Image: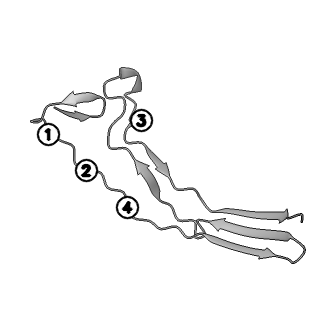
Amino acid sequence: MIFSSFRPVSSNEPRPAPITRPSWSQTNLQLGYTSNNGWETRLIARNLFDETGINWLSTTAYGDDLPAFSDDRFHYLRTLQKPLTVSLSFSKKWK
């Protein structure tokens, strides 16, 4: 017996076509400086070019067996890549 989603499926039942994610890339950049007196600063940019990508894509339609969740919004859920994020940090090392 093969299990698909939360219900068992017989081996002669047709299987859904695989869902593929489109390719994407992400560029991160980190620049830092440390002074002789212990001060450090860092500039970090994640997803520098603000690319849009899908990190995870479900291969099941959630809620098919539950009428309360038969809304199309719950079918084939996905998580998206985070947008451009920039941070600046300062720190001091005490000797």
Type of amino acid at the residue the image marks with label 1: Pro
Say whether marks 4 and 1 touch (CB < 8 Å).
no
- The C terminus - image quarter: bottom right
Relative placement, left or right, of 77 versus 32 is: left
Q: In 3D space, how far apart are the residues under numbered discs 4 and 1 (Cα atoms)?
A: 25 Å
Type of amino acid at the residue the image marks with label 2: Pro
Q: In 3D space, how far apart are the residues under numbered discs 2 and 3 (Cα atoms)?
A: 18 Å
Query: Which numbered disc, 2 or 3, marks the residue that appears first in the sequence?
Result: 2
Q: In 3D space, how far apart are the residues under numbered discs 2 and 4 (Cα atoms)?
A: 13 Å
Q: What element carries label 1?
A: loop
Picture quarter containing residue 21? bottom left
Q: Nearer the viewer, residue 86 or 41?
A: 41
Q: Name the mark on residue 18.
A: 2
Q: Residue at x 53, y 65 (%)?
A: 51
- Farthest residue toward the left? 12
Type of amino acid at the residue the image marks with label 3: Phe
Residue 5 vertical position relative to residue 83 in the rendered view, above or below = above
Q: In 3D space, how far apart are the residues under numbered discs 3 and 4 (Cα atoms)?
A: 20 Å
Type of amino acid at the residue the image marks with label 4: Pro
Relative placement, left or right, of 66 versus 48 is: left
Q: Which residue is drawn at 52% across and 56% down?
A: 81
Q: Name the mark on residue 22.
A: 4
| Structural crowding at the residue carrying mark 4, measured as other residues with C-alpha within 10 Å and reported as few (<14), some (14–19) or many (≥20) | few
Percent across and percent down for residue 31 are 71, 74
Q: Name the mark on residue 74.
A: 3
Q: Which residue is drawn at 50% across and 61% down?
A: 52
Percent across and percent down for residue 1 are 16, 31
Query: Which numbered disc, 3 or 4, marks the residue that appears first in the sequence?
Result: 4
Percent across and percent down for residue 13 are 13, 35
Q: Identify the residue position indicated by label 1 in the image.
A: 14
Query: Which numbered disc, 4 or 1, marks the residue that appears first in the sequence?
Result: 1
